[in-house]
Amino acid sequence: MDLSQLLDPLAAALVLGGTLAAALLRCGWADSRETLRALAQLAGKGFAAAAIRAELGAQIQEIGRDGLVRAQPHRFDDNAFDALADALIRRRSLAALQQEHEKYRTARLARADTAIAVLGQAAELAPVLGLAGTLLSLGGLSAMAAGGDTAQAIGTAVTTTLYGLVLANFVFAPLAAAIGRRSQAEESARQELLEWLTDAVREACPAPPLAQEPRSRAA
């Protein structure tokens, strides 16, 4: 089999371009931009848990030495942990720490779900656009019968269907799954860091000044 017969730039442009345009129209600009951002992050290094843990260790040492009142929040090149440090130092409360974590966690999961949904839509649309390309190519056979290249039209009809299936099952669906796996791994790493930070703060700075839940009075 000659694999070069499967290379059809026109068919690829038709299916890919049509799928992207249809997904954009269906999902909108905002969700599409969020998907591009998620794909860019997927190509990056990911959540730097080791570096943030090291910086958190320095923050804990400072809290143990100077106390929460005089300690200054460190910066971690991560918006969520920057906010966590601010909440811990400014409000001196583990409850505030948990609230900030949950707020950022909810936003991160929502962004990941948006990207997964957009890529899922693209995976559904790609075979449809492949079939549309096939129908267009077959519809032009009658015009080509008078002297056109009928074999080329048939080849384009076959390859558009193939490209649609390949894009759906080997590009868009795997990318959606990869974003989901990255999101789950990141949330697990962040949760582990948060639990470690909470235990370390309790050891470094027992109440007061750390805010604690009020104890019930003995009868």
Image: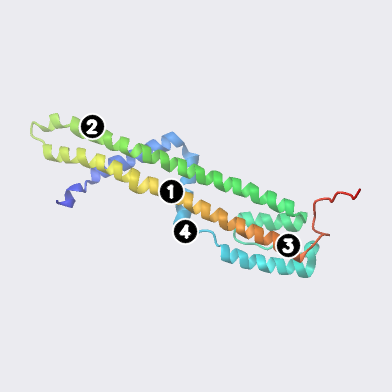
Q: Which residue is mark 3?
A: 201
On the rendered structure, is 44 left or right of 89?
Answer: left
Whole-number angstrom distance, CA of label 3 to CA of label 4: 31 Å
Q: Note whether 185 is above or below 50 in the view shown.
A: above
User: Residue at image x 46%, y 54%?
Assistant: 42
Total label count? Answer: 4
Residue 214: x percent and y percent?
Answer: 83, 50
**How has the structure been colored for display?**
rainbow
Q: Which mark is residue 177?
A: 1
- Between disc 1 and disc 2, the foreground one is 1
Amino acid type, residue under disc 3 in the picture: Val
Q: Is residue 150 above or below residue 65?
A: above
Q: CA distance from mark 3 to mark 1?
A: 36 Å
Q: Residues within 10 Å of mark 3 (few under 14, many from 20)?
A: many
Q: Secondary structure at mark 4?
A: loop
Q: Residues within 10 Å of mark 2 (few under 14, many from 20)?
A: some
Q: Which mark is residue 135?
A: 2
- The residue carrying mark 4 is 44
Which is nearer the N-term, disc 1 or disc 4?
A: 4
Nearer to the camera, 176 or 212: 212
